[in-house]
Amino acid sequence: MTQLPATTDKKLGLVIDLDTCVGCHACVTACKGWNDQGYGAALTDQDPYGAEPSGVFLNRVHSYEVQPEAGPAQIVNFPRSCLHCEDAPCVTVCPTGASYKRQEDGIVLVNEDACIGCGLCAWACPYGAREMEETAGVMKKCTLCVDRIYNENLPEIDRQPACVRTCPTGARHFGDLGDPDSKVSRLVAERGGFELMPEQGTKPVNRYLPPRKKDRPQEASLLAPLLDIKATGFAGWLDKLLERI
């Protein structure tokens, strides 16, 4: 079994703002595009246009209808990918050492040359963050675009995970969550960021920022003013037409 490092020099991870994520799936598309040509085996699709299509995605976005105690129901878009846990069960359960956590930055990766596709890591992960690449017979997961964030051939502005660089609403943030003075750590502290399913004891590095309360303008999303815009002219006619469908 693979051993976890006692400590890591950094805790690189993502902070995802559930208040500004609009569920556009741009992050999903960017992740798929980059990882089709980057680290490890490509992310293939099986019969993508058939009756039962399936494919490998390292990042997915789910949408849920949430009913607050007071007020109308809300739609929350919830992105999901590997959380690069400090106590990663997917690593310790791996029989070949293919799954491992890097000491220098805390990123959890898979050595695909050593992976036998047994699926134990997927079974051990409580977040469903592992997917089998059937063509290559190996397990795949989010790498935080490790082949991108350290790539000196890219402009510095592009040395971020593809999902972060692509997000049109700025809902995704990347940085060192082990540094209390980093931008992402300050964001978590200011907004009450939380970890997913802490009861599992995996100590996920990634954090989520909760939706702001819409009845408090000072806390509302930066996108909130857009909700008050009324379409006029042709756009207004089209808007009324679509309401009838």
Image: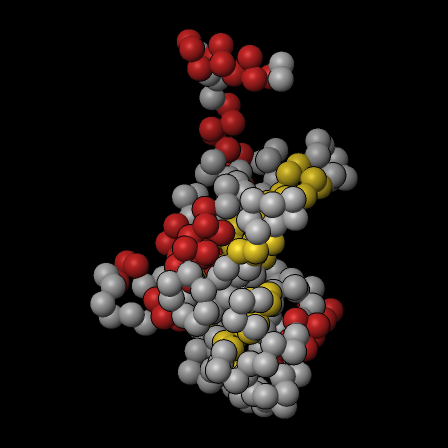
Give the quadrant of the N terminus.
Answer: bottom right
Q: Is residue 123 left or right of residue 240?
A: right
Does the image show residue 195?
yes
Give percent across and percent down for residue 125. Answer: 66, 71
Q: Nearer the viewer, residue 20 or 160?
A: 160
Looking at the picture, does residue 171 appear above or below residue 139? above
Residue 67, relative to residue 59: is it above or below?
above
Q: Which quarter of the figure has residue 50?
A: top right
Left or right: where does residue 12 sit relative to residue 66?
left
How far from the left and from the top, in percent, is residue 121? Answer: 64, 76
Q: Is residue 106 above or below residue 215?
A: below
Dividing the image into 4 quarters, which one contains the C terminus? top right
What residue lies at 59% left-to-right and 35% top-to-bottom?
A: 214
Position of 172 relative to 156 (above/below): above
Q: How many marks?
A: 0
Closer to the camera in the image, 195 or 34: 34
Q: Position of residue 34 (x, y in %)?
A: 39, 59
Q: What residue appears at the point 43 percent right and 43 percent down from the top-left corner?
A: 169
Q: Residue at x 63, y 87 (%)?
A: 95
Residue drawn at (66%, 36%), measured in percent from left and top?
A: 74
Task: Determine if residue 18 is in view.
Answer: no
User: Would you say 133 lies left or right of 186 here?
Assistant: right
The residue at the far right in this view is 69
What's the image's color scheme? secondary structure
